[in-house]
Image (cartoon, grey):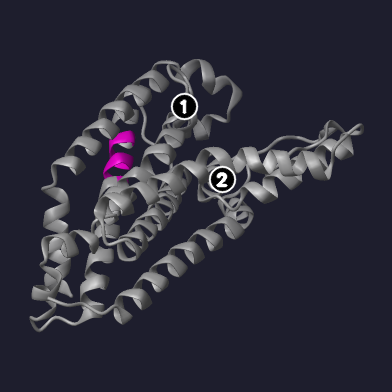
Amino acid sequence: MSVVFWKELADHFSSRRFMILLAIIVLTGVWAIYASGQSIRQEAESAPAEFVFLLLLTSQSGGLFSFATFLGLLGPLVGIMLGFDAISGEYARGTLSRVLSQPIYRDSLINGKFIAGLTTVAILWASVLLLVIGLGIVLVGFPPNAEELWRMLIFTVVGILYVGFWLALALLFSLLFQRTVTAALGSLALWLFLTIFAPLIAQLAAALIVPDPSTPEGVVRQVDIANMFSRISPSTLYAETVQIVLNPLARGLGMVLAEQTQGFQLTPLALSQSLLLILPQLTTLIALVAVCFCISYIKFMRTEIRA
């Protein structure tokens, strides 16, 4: 498996499409972080001083999206790009039967390909995080504290799991469709549906269940139902996790009535309490990655491969 792992890892980092996508992420990230750093002094007035550094990831200054949201939009493309031709490309080139004729087991091949893709995602996400920290120190003038570093580390783990799901899904489509174009289009179509149309369908379903929310409690119930349906999308799970991890002032998900916040002093949550809030989202992301890869594993082990 180590031979397959190192070979796939070298192919990923020498791929032109990966370098192009990496350049887009880095250049856009530098622009977003620079714009956030320029206005960090104004936005720091509405946040505790000890968590100003997290604004580099969550601030929308200078653009339509924050840097964390931008990574959530482009991250799936990285996973799809790394996995859509993992098996179908071998079929198309006629090299799969030659590789398996060597003393390489089937499980070693698919495990090596998946771990190499996941390692590439981890290196990319960690590099982006180090870029944020380095530019943030230059722009803000001081380094992040220990809790900010821990929250950024958890954000990195969440990002790896999020992109890892799309990697496992693209690997599955690569097995189901032996044509690389079909696997790529299927992965992109599902990404667009879960990212754009799933939240819209969730709002329509909530409007059908609660058609006339005339009271504040009805509005909250409608929002809760919409959030429940939209959580079938990994993008929603990622957005909710980032909202809690990178914002220590966030105390929950969904709508909160004004009566519930009267006389309540807003203080930052401890890291352990934030982790308790996002535990269902983290568990679901891990389960999605495991289920997609297990289906791919079983499918590949039972597929008949001919020369």
Would residue 129 be counted in the magenta stretch? Answer: yes
Q: Is residue 265 left or right of residue 106?
A: right
What percent of the width, then of the height, locates residue 5? 17, 67
Q: Is residue 157 above or below residue 76?
A: below
Residue 65 is marked as 1
What percent of the width, then of the height, locates residue 33? 36, 26
> What segment is highlighted magenta in the picture?
125-132
At label 1, counting other C-alpha atoms closer than 10 Å, the crowd grade (few under 14, some 14-19, many 20 or more) is some
Residue visible at 49% across and 63% down in the picture = 288
Q: Is residue 282 left or right of residue 261?
A: left
Residue visible at 63% across and 45% down in the picture = 269
Q: How many numbered discs?
A: 2
Q: Is residue 18 left or right of residue 265?
A: left
Q: Amino acid at mark 2?
A: Thr
Q: Amino acid at mark 1?
A: Phe
Q: Is residue 271 at all visible to an observer of this figure? A: yes
Residue bearing the label numbered 2: 236
Q: Secondary structure at mark 1?
A: loop
Query: Quick check: marks 1 and 2 in contact, CB under 8 Å?
Result: no
Q: Quadrant of residue 32?
A: top left
Q: Quadrant of residue 19?
A: top left
Q: Is residue 138 at all visible to an observer of this figure? A: no
Tell me how far mark 1 sits from mark 2, CA to CA.
15 Å
What percent of the width, then of the height, locates residue 203? 70, 39
Seen as rendered, the residue at the extreme right is 215
